[in-house]
Image (cartoon, rainbow, N blue to C red):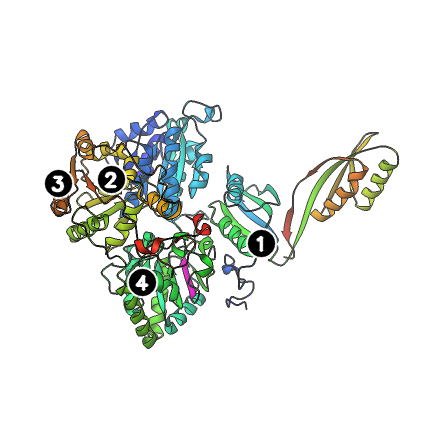
């Protein structure tokens, strides 16, 4: 039981700030938003973030249920606990939004991102890049005599770490998908 | 059972099925097929406004005075962009309106066609929801859905953008569904566990206060009735925001008057000193709370609101209850009665004694002048002379609006139409037209300032054309009064662009439109002039020349808490610090 006497995990209170006081601590949360797949729905979600001054660290969107016309938006955002609660409540208010899940508080989640990295170089640097790619289980998806394109999946931190290593070895371009996430367990 | 018909006919049929009797609009190229259908029927009355902004405010006035959705029909491009202010106004004040806009044909969208604008893009942040209809097949069900969204949950404006080819094409008409099967079904019943905690708090509270808002009005007359019952039964004092005036009668003995920046002394000090604040359908707006870290520091706060995003947005709540005000109040009342109707009688008596002390300050006191009409005096006389009438009051925005809220008494909900959240100058006149359409026999008065009124003065044409006897009660100080007041208090009396040097002769203006004009500048003539206005069967512009430099008090300076109110001229010296200046 929290200070507000709300049972832990009680979903009907999910719109409430369950913390006893407003805090200044910045937190990063991953939200999964199930939306009706209709024109303009992504603009509504993004417009909410820009209009109310919330942060978007990463955002991915794709249709997940063709029959049911549902898309899933995964958005990683940073803010104080109060702002995070507001973001969830404001998202829930958008008419075509069906569900909002805060994967960060709902018992943990699996988060993955896919990145493509173009690394150009010859000689030792090229060999070293290939060796590191092997360690990170990155795949070579395109190759010339002067360059590789690596494909890497993993957490955003893993992608960051790999990119940092590639930079001195000739990283010239990177494309990232942003985070896709699912709650753990059934 | 389905019927084939054109999209244009579908629009009219869907409006009829939704029980719409009045549409405010302005024709143009992209809505001509719909106007052609309107021409060929008699069930829906169309009111031709003189500017699309006027159409939306008229629809808002209609909606606020009836509880039914207001409907607007305008053309593409400029028709739609002119509707944006009204849409934003309705969004801020949670007013249900349905705006239908024409659009260029689907195959021309995106080509920068004549009178093309990205209407759904432009209005996305200022509607509760909007739709661009690309197939006639879907048109009727989208219009029905639009009414459902506008009215359910926290009400608000919706917009349906209808390309011209969709209006011409034919498809099957889908009748209004018996019950909405769509997923959008906001929660109306409050959580019983939390309601129980609130009832426990009511039973023991020593210094309780009800803080009510527009949500009570939006919940319907039943909610106002339940609120009155709860207030009478508990004997708790009650104050209200600007938007909630009328949900509890001004003549009721527990009434403290409006609270907030220009609220009454007793109302604001009760909010500051209470130990239990019961927020019913209000949203802790910044004009209400003043300085947040000093807002009602000793109280437990309950918040009843249908919109989860209102809860804990600016003020942390101890008893958050998501639900419709009417449903929640019913449960609160039932539970409180079944537990034995307990209150902390002794403490409540002491609390009322304290409130009576604050009341003695008589914060609305003013000394009428014999030389010029004080605006407060004009409103006090308007109140006295119209009290017995079936009366509806609209306002524009500024000092006159605050004085109207202070000096006029509202006995019932839906009798007070004002732009609260957005503060739209130019709102009141078209709103009064919408109200008069809904209540043709009633006395509809728009309390205005001359500057606000000029912003939508073209609607005189509408009032005269439809013989709507709206009374425009203009408190004319030849100033932008509220701006001038802030410049006096905050900007070293440098009155930058806050007066008008070229005002029209309002009597001649009225006559030019074919209406009646009345000029009044002598306090001795005021009563007769007001009676002349009331008794005239037709629209009147009442030009009431008032004291030019009167300031609106009481007042909580920006950046200050409720207990730092200014009561009159003497207390204004250096009242607002630099920090407060940015909060204006």
A160 to B106, vertically: above or below: below
Q: Nearer the viewer, residue B302 or B162?
A: B302
Q: Quadrant of residue B226?
A: bottom left
Quarter containing the C terminus of chain A = bottom right
* Badge 1 element: strand
Q: Chain of mark 2?
A: B
- Name the residue beneath numbered marker 3: B536
Asked if labels 2 and 1 touch by Cβ distance under 8 angstroms, the answer is: no
A75 to B296, vertically: above or below: above
Q: Position of residue B521 (x, y in %)?
A: 17, 42
Q: Position of residue A155 (x, y in %)?
A: 70, 48
Can the viewer see residue A111 in this picture?
yes
- The Cα atoms of the two marked residues, 1 and 3, are separated by 62 Å
The residue stretch that appears in magenta: B299-305
Q: Position of residue A138 (x, y in %)?
A: 78, 42
* Badge 2 element: helix
- The Cα atoms of the two marked residues, 1 and 2, are separated by 47 Å
Q: Are marks 3 and 4 on the same chain?
A: yes
- Name the residue beneath numbered marker 2: B433
Q: Nearer the viewer, mark 1 or mark 3?
A: 3
- Name the residue beneath numbered marker 1: A102
Sequence order check, earlier mark of 4 and 2:
4
Q: Chain of mark 3?
A: B
Q: Is residue A143 left or right of residue B486?
A: right
| Residue B266 badge | 4
Residue B155 is inside the magenta segment: no
Q: Are marks 3 and 2 on the same chain?
A: yes
Q: Is residue A70 left or right of residue B393?
A: right
B515 to B357, vertically: above or below: above
* Badge 4 element: helix
């Amino acid at each position: 039981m929290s200070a507000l006497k709300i049972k832990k995990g009680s979903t009907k209170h999910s719109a409430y700030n369950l913390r006893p006081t407003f805090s200044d601590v910045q937190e990063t949360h991953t939200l999964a938003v199930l939306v009706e797949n209709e024109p303009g729905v992504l603009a509504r979600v993004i417009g909410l973030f820009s209009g109310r001054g919330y942060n978007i660290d990463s955002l991915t969107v794709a249709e997940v249920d063709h029959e049911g016309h549902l898309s899933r938006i995964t958005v990683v955002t940073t803010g104080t606990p109060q702002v995070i609660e507001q973001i969830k409540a404001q998202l829930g208010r958008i008419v075509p939004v069906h569900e909002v899940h805060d994967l960060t508080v709902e018992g943990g989640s699996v988060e993955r991102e896919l990145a493509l990295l173009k690394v150009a170089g010859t000689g030792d640097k090229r060999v070293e890049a290939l060796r590191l790619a092997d360690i990170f289980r990155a795949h070579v998806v395109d190759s010339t005599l002067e360059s590789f394109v690596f494909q890497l999946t993993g957490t955003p931190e893993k992608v960051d770490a790999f990119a940092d290593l590639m930079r001195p070895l000739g990283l010239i371009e990177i494309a990232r998908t942003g985070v896709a996430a699912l709650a753990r367990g059934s | 059972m389905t019927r084939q018909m054109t999209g244009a006919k579908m629009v009219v049929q869907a409006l009829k099925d939704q029980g719409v009797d009045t549409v405010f609009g302005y024709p143009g190229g992209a809505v001509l097929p719909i106007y052609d259908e309107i021409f060929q029927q008699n069930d829906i009355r169309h009111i031709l406004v003189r500017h699309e902004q006027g159409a939306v405010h008229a629809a808002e006035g209609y909606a606020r005075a009836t509880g039914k959705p207001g409907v607007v029909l305008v053309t593409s491009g400029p028709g739609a962009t002119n509707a944006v202010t009204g849409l934003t106004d309705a969004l801020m004040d949670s007013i249900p309106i349905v705006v239908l806009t024409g659009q260029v044909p689907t195959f021309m969208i995106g080509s920068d066609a004549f009178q093309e604008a990205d209407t759904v893009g432009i209005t996305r942040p200022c509607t509760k929801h909007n739709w661009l209809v690309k197939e006639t097949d879907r048109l009727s069900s989208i219009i029905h859905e639009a009414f459902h969204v506008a009215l359910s949950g926290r009400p608000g404006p919706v917009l349906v953008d209808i390309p011209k080819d969709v209006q011409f094409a034919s498809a099957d008409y889908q009748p209004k569904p018996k019950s909405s099967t769509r997923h959008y079904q906001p929660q109306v019943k409050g959580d019983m566990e939390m309601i129980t905690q609130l009832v426990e708090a009511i039973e023991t509270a020593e210094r309780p206060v009800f803080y009510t808002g527009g949500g009570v009005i939006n919940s319907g007359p039943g909610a106002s009735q339940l609120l009155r019952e709860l207030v009478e039964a508990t004997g708790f004092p009650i104050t209200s925001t600007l938007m909630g005036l009328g949900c509890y009668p001004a003549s009721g003995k527990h009434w403290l008057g409006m609270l907030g920046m220009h609220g009454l002394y007793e109302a604001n000090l009760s909010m500051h000193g209470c130990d239990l604040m019961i927020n019913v359908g209000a949203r802790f707006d910044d004009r209400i709370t003043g300085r947040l870290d000093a807002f009602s520091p000793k109280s437990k706060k309950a918040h009843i609101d249908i919109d989860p995003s209102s809860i804990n947005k600016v003020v942390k709540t101890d008893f958050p209850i998501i639900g419709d005000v009417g449903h929640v109040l019913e449960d609160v009342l039932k539970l409180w009665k079944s537990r034995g109707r307990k209150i902390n009688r002794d403490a409540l008596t002491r609390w009322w004694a304290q409130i009576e002390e604050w009341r003695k300050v008589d914060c609305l006191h003013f000394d009428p002048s014999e030389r010029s009409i004080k605006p407060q005096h004009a409103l006090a006389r308007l109140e006295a002379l119209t009290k017995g009438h079936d009366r509806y009051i609209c306002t524009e925005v500024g000092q006159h609006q605050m004085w109207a809220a202070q000096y006029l008494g509202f006995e019932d909900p839906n009798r007070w139409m004002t732009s609260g959240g957005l503060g739209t100058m130019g709102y009141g006149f078209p709103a009064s037209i919408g109200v008069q359409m809904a209540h043709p026999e009633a006395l509809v008065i728009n309390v205005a300032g001359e500057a606000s009124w000029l912003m939508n003065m073209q609607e005189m044409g509408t009032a005269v054309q439809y013989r709507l006897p709206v009374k425009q009660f203009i408190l004319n100080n030849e100033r932008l009064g509220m701006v001038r007041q802030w410049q006096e208090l905050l900007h070293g009396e440098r009155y930058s662009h806050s007066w008008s040097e070229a005002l029209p002769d309002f009597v001649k203006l009225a006559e030019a439109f074919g209406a009646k004009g009345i000029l009044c500048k002598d306090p001795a003539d005021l009563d007769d002039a007001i009676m002349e206005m009331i008794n005239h069967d037709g629209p009147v512009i009442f030009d009431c020349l008032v004291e030019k430099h009167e300031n609106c008090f009481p007042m909580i300076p920006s950046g200050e808490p409720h207990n730092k109110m200014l009561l009159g001229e003497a207390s204004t010296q250096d009242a607002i610090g630099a920090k407060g200046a940015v909060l204006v």
